Amino acid sequence: MSLSPRPGSDFSETTPLRAPVFKLGDINQPLELTHKEQQTLASYLGKCDRRLLFYLCFGYATDSLNKMALSNAKIAGLTADLDLQGYDINTALGAYYLGSFLFQLPSNLILKRARPRYWLSIVMLSWSLVTMCTALVQNAAQLAWCIWPWKLIFDVIGLVSLCWGVLGPSVLQDYPDTAMFITDEDRKQVLQTLADWKIMLWTVIDFCANATTQVNGLFGPTIIAGQGYSPHVVQALLAFTNFMVFSDMR
């Protein structure tokens, strides 16, 4: 099966890439690479690490901070200042996850049409602005519409991710066959690597780990504060654990 080059690709019609033959019955077989292919793969991974890994990891970290901002703002005085009652906080959290659920599919469909470097940057910039604007909410209804954090917490987190999102178009790449920092040999290796069953397994593992992280981020501040710690101590404990998680990303 030949792969048609995307617009802007360096490949010509006379030298199409061919995806490796991948059969369901071979899923338990290890991916065997020649010595040259191993060298090519190592070179490709090194280039991706240097060009993309830090940016993506830090972007993911700011995304997590945005999600945790409401819980952190709650123990920092949000509930009292906005006179929130009963399930007001849960309503705001539910509004976020409902929106996230409804727009996941359209967003991924847009990635099929738009250039990923620009679309992903637009998404990051948009949520950064929403986070910062949430500092202006005056009541529970406005909070549910904005969905996010409180005063300085929202402004600082939103500003960091905003600045990081601006770098997206210049740092991110759209597709392996249009990436400027890898060679033709690297591109062929990418296709073979993506057929490895371990990639699929890692996707499932990452989904489960992410679900756990979300629960900790949303309810961790409230649980720790419930043990009698002051808001400043809670923020420091969470900042330490988040830093350790971020430092282990690689």
Image (cartoon, helix red, strand yellow):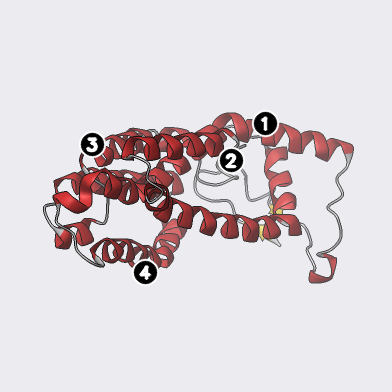
Q: Which amino acid does label 1 sit on?
A: Gly
Alpha-carbon span between mark 3 and mark 4 = 29 Å
Give the mark nearest the N terminus, 4 or 1. 1
Q: Residues within 10 Å of mark 2 (few under 14, many from 20)?
A: few
**Circle 4 or circle 1, nearest the eye:** 4
Alpha-carbon span between mark 1 and mark 3 = 38 Å
Q: Is residue 181 visible?
A: yes
Q: Mark 2 points at which residue?
A: 10
Across the whole image, how many numbered discs are drawn on residues?
A: 4
Give the mark nearest the N terminus, 2 or 4. 2
Q: Mark 1 points at which residue?
A: 46
- The residue that appears at 15% across and 49% down in the rendered structure is 81
- The residue that appears at 27% across and 66% down in the rendered structure is 91
Query: Is 207 situated left or right of 139 in this image?
Result: right
Nearer-the-camera pick, 90 or 121? 90
- The residue that appears at 43% across and 51% down in the rendered structure is 220
